[in-house]
Image (tube, rainbow, N blue to C red):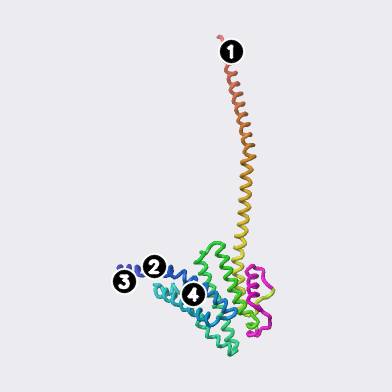
Amino acid sequence: MRTQPEHDSQQQLKHERWALLEQINALTDKPMIVLSFIWLALLILDFTGGLSPFLQTVSYILWGLFILDFAIEFMIAPHKLDYLRRNWLTAVSLLLPALRILRIFRALRVLRAARALRSISLLRLVTSLNRGMRAVAKTMGRRGIGYIASLTLIVTFAGAAGMYAFESPAALSEAQIEATGLVNYGEAVWWTAMIMTTMGSEYWPKTGEGRILGWLLSLYAFAIFGYITATIASYFVGQDAAGDQAEGTGALSAQETATLRHEIATLQAHVAALTHELQRGRAVSLTSSTDQPMDKR
């Protein structure tokens, strides 16, 4: 059984390790934010047109840096399970690039392998979006219209890359689905933008991964677009209220103030006249009572 000094020592060590972890996060936050945006841009390029050997090498280097950062933080964290529960999506995003070897199955033209690859690509997109969202949150905070607008742009362009990867003519042909699909990335951006504004589009996803991604985009649009609309409406309502208040204040100071002063002066004159009449009445009554003769008995 641990003694009290040993328990205090263990608690102090845990506290120091958490403090060290916070210091490391403070030092690495800004570089990791920049690398997260680069990682997300490379993912969009990979989904839309593929990466050149040089960009693929850059992607692997970034992946290695993310793994190194995660491993250092995991080693320092005193509670490993708690750290994993907080960062499980980050851990998944670091494991997925290792599964890129499944691309060789495309040459085998096996339907199950291709479907597994598309599912992994969807998971890669979601986890990379999570990293991008965290980078935006650390850069701009989690409040304000600027944060929401930046987040929506990232979701729109990254989501469009995923929709193009899952719903392109080549992907539909590989899935043995007869449809035109989204013929280029620009059309996918347009489709995603319409989803973001909750207006919808004539085309609806045909593949399972495309439908899941489309549902996630619609869910995001439903939650965020209402906030943006309410923010814009409250801004204009506030401007109108401020204008009405300014106009009302100006009219009161110019016209109504003079009228009120005149009415107050009139009331004061009436009060003074009534007071004077009351005083005269009392004086007359006192005089009349004094002049009356006293009764003789």
- Residue pointed to by mark 3: 2
Instruction: Mark 2 and mark 4 in contact? Answer it, CB < 8 Å.
Output: no
Tell me the kind of residue under disc 3. Answer: Arg
Q: How far apart are labels 4 and 3 at the CA level?
A: 36 Å
| Residue 236 coordinates in the image, percent (x, y) | 63, 56
Which mark is in front, 1 or 2? 2
- Residue pointed to by mark 2: 19
Q: Mark 2 or mark 4, which has the lower sequence index? A: 2
Q: Quadrant of the C terminus?
A: top right
Which mark is in front, 1 or 4? 4
Q: What residue is drawn where x is 62% and y is 55%?
A: 237
Residue 229 magenta-drawn? no
- Residue 290 figure quarter: top right
Tell me the kind of residue under disc 4. Answer: Thr
- Residue pointed to by mark 1: 292
Residue 59, above or below 106: above
Q: How far apart are labels 2 and 4 at the CA level?
A: 21 Å
Which mark is in front, 1 or 3? 3
**Within 10 angstroms of label 4, few (less than 14), some, or many (20 or more) residues?**
some
Tell me the kind of residue under disc 2. Answer: Ala
Helix, strand or loop under label 2: helix
- Residue pointed to by mark 4: 90
Instruction: Mark 1 and mark 4 in contact? Answer it, CB < 8 Å.
Output: no
Q: What residue is drawn where x is 57% and y is 77%?
A: 45
Helix, strand or loop under label 1: loop
Helix, strand or loop under label 3: loop
Which residue is situated farthest in the bottom direction here? 108
- Identify the magenta region: 173-201
